[in-house]
Image (cartoon, rainbow, N blue to C red):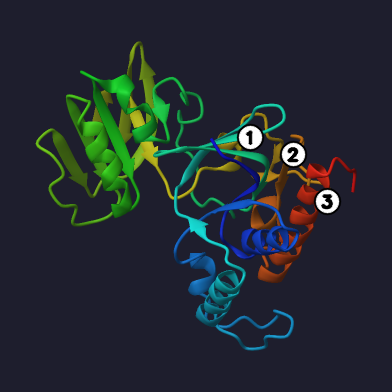
């Protein structure tokens, strides 16, 4: 398996600047993110405080980012990273489809919106999971509930249904198509709580209770404390020093995920620092 120098998770200003800086330093990088880069950027009407670009719109800034990536020959891997594990001198990054390896990692995942449900954290790894494809093999002959926030999660539901006897899909959006004979689609309900009852587990919504063998919560992004075991978090943000180092050697963070102010130019600056720190780490230096 190929082991990259630096893996960067996130395609907001912080992640993109980190990727460009690392590329300029001749590092073999792997950038994970979205085709549209960042909805926070593309939906912005006017950005007034981005140095040198007065009155630029979010869409124009996103297009400028894409052009910069193209000129630098930086590609985006659209795999959603569900977990990052420190293995000593390298990291393993897990997606639903594939496993990746990197000598260092920069997290630029932004702020994850939405709070966890009561019972979610307590039962993580014991009936609750964030990757249906990863754990599908464990549900052969069993039942599962999937909470999906967007249509792109339907592929994981279908994959899980090929193993499980029944899948109940709680869709938090409308007009879900037919997925499989053993998939029951539920629309118009809001998850409220997760309750463990012996070997079984129950998802409580605003309208009903669903007792099952496992619950999969498929959000657009995984909060950093669940993404990386052992990561130091305060008030929902990753704790870093001025070099954007975290408490885990070889792991850096930048952008909104490190705390306020949530500003594009601040995120880009931190991305630059995180990449330079990762380069120094790889060279065996203390920056």
Label annotation for residue 243 = 3
Q: For the residue labelled by badge 2, is the local secondary structure a helix, a strand or a loop?
A: loop
- Locate residue 194, reporting x and y percent: 39, 29
Query: According to the image, label 2 marks what residue?
Result: 250
Q: Earlier in the sequence, mark 1 or mark 2?
A: 1
Is residue 244 something one can see in this rendering?
Answer: no
**Residue depicted at x 62% and y 80%:** 47
Q: For the residue labelled by badge 3, is the local secondary structure a helix, a strand or a loop?
A: loop
Front residue of this view, candidates 119 and 71: 71
Q: Is residue 223 left or right of residue 265?
A: left
Q: Badge 3 local density, few (<14 within 10 Å), some, or many (20+)?
A: some
As measured in the structure, the alpha-carbon distance from the residue carrying label 3 to the one carrying label 2 is 12 Å
Q: Earlier in the sequence, mark 3 or mark 2?
A: 3
Q: Are marks 1 and 2 in contact (CB under 8 Å)?
A: yes
Q: Is residue 99 left or right of residue 72?
A: left
Query: According to the image, label 1 marks what residue?
Result: 91
Q: How many numbered discs? A: 3
């Amino acid at each position: 398996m190929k082991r990259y120098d630096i893996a960067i998770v996130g395609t907001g200003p912080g992640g993109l600047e980190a990727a460009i800086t690392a590329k300029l330093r001749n590092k073999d990088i792997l950038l994970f993110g979205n085709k549209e880069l960042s909805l926070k950027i593309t939906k912005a009407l006017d950005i007034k405080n981005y140095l040198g670009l007065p009155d630029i719109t979010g869409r124009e800034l996103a297009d400028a980012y894409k052009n910069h990536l193209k000129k630098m020959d930086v590609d985006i891997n659209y795999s959603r990273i569900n977990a990052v594990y420190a293995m000593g001198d390298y990291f393993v990054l897990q997606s639903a489809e594939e496993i990746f390896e990197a000598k260092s990692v920069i997290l630029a995942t932004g702020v994850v919106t939405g709070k966890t449900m009561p019972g979610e954290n307590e039962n993580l790894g014991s009936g609750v999971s964030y990757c249906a494809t990863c754990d599908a093999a464990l549900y052969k002959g069993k039942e599962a509930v999937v909470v999906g926030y967007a249509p792109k999660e339907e592929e994981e539901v279908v994959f899980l249904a090929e193993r499980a006897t029944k899948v109940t899909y709680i869709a938090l959006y409308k007009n879900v198509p037919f997925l499989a004979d053993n998939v029951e689609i539920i629309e118009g309900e809001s998850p409220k709580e997760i309750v463990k009852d012996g070997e079984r587990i129950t998802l409580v919504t605003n309208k009903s209770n669903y007792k099952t063998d496992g619950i999969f919560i498929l959000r657009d992004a995984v909060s950093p404390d669940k993404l990386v075991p052992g990561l130091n978090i305060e008030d929902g943000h990753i704790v870093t020093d001025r070099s954007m180092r975290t408490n885990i050697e070889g792991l850096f963070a930048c952008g909104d995920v490190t705390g306020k102010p949530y500003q594009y130019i601040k995120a880009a600056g931190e991305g630059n620092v995180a990449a330079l720190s990762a380069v120094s780490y790889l060279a065996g230096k203390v920056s």
